[in-house]
Image: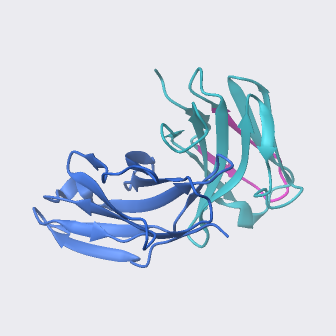
Chain colours: A cyan, B blue
Amino acid sequence: DAGVIQSPRHEVTEMGQEVTLRCKPISGHDYLFWYRQTMMRGLELLIYFNNNVPIDDSGMPEDRFSAKMPNASFSTLKIQPSEPRDSAVYFCASSLTGGGYGYTFGSGTRLTVV
Amino acid sequence: AQKITQTQPGMFVQEKEAVTLDCTYDTSDPSYGLFWYKQPSSGEMIFLIYQGSYDQQNATEGRYSLNFQKARKSANLVISASQLGDSAMYFCAMETSYDKVIFGPGTSLSVIP
């Protein structure tokens, strides 16, 4: 199994540009989670999906952030327009049952907005 | 409100010694799970150990054990026989009743040769 695959690994963009982060969960995992990690705020859950349906997006910081899961094997997190304070590492994780047991994280995308 | 607290921002341990990383949690859910993850400098998140709230015995995984004290709402991670490769950030986490997992702020562990 290839694990959770995120792309790109690194992204540098200018303020105001649209940024799209991608995630491919482990096949058969029904839950997908997007986290953001910063020094100041640690690991924050942004949104999670169950069977491609968004269940809780209360962690999405602003309307500039949106996430989709058009099918069981692909999810995107979009920031439009991006701002320097969005600079962080964004992790995607998937899980079979929803709980943390068996949670598998991707390698993360390090986003820098200049 | 559900919350994870890790009061040790940084810890040092001598190689081959044991170390305990503290974690306390707050939840009103009768059923929950507690986890520890390791994040080395390379950035990936590595699952270490899991403890269910109804598990009678403390979880163990190799050199890792979880000292679960339900009444005190603590779930400390014990690493025995520390190795240089154990130097990393360690996160305590809890799964909530809504299938979410929330994380503590982390403890940075440095193993000294």
**Residue A47 belongs to the span the image colors magenta:** no
Q: Residue at x 44, y 53 (%)?
A: B35
Query: Extreme right residue here?
Result: A63
Q: Does residue B45 appear left or right of residue B19 in this picture?
A: right
Relative image position of residue A86 (x, y in whole percent): 72, 61
Residue nearer the viewer, A28 or B26: B26
Q: Residue at x 30, y 51 (%)?
A: B57
**Residue A17 belongs to the span the image colors magenta:** yes
The residue segment tinted magenta is A10-23
Quarter of the image for the C terminus of chain A: give it: bottom right
Residue nearer the viewer, B46 or B74: B74
Question: Does B94 appear above or below A20?
Answer: below
Q: Does residue B67 appear left or right of residue A64 in this picture?
A: left
Q: Does residue A17 appear left or right of residue B5 in this picture?
A: right
Question: Which is the main secondary structure of the residues drawn in magenta?
Answer: strand
Q: Residue at x 76, y 56 (%)?
A: A14
Relative image position of residue A44 (x, y in whole percent): 64, 59
Q: Residue at x 10, y 61 (%)?
A: B16
Relative image position of residue A47 (x, y in whole percent): 74, 48
Q: Find residue A42 and report its image quarter.
A: bottom right
Residue A112 seen anywhere in this rendered image of the structure: yes
Residue A19 seen anywhere in this rendered image of the structure: no
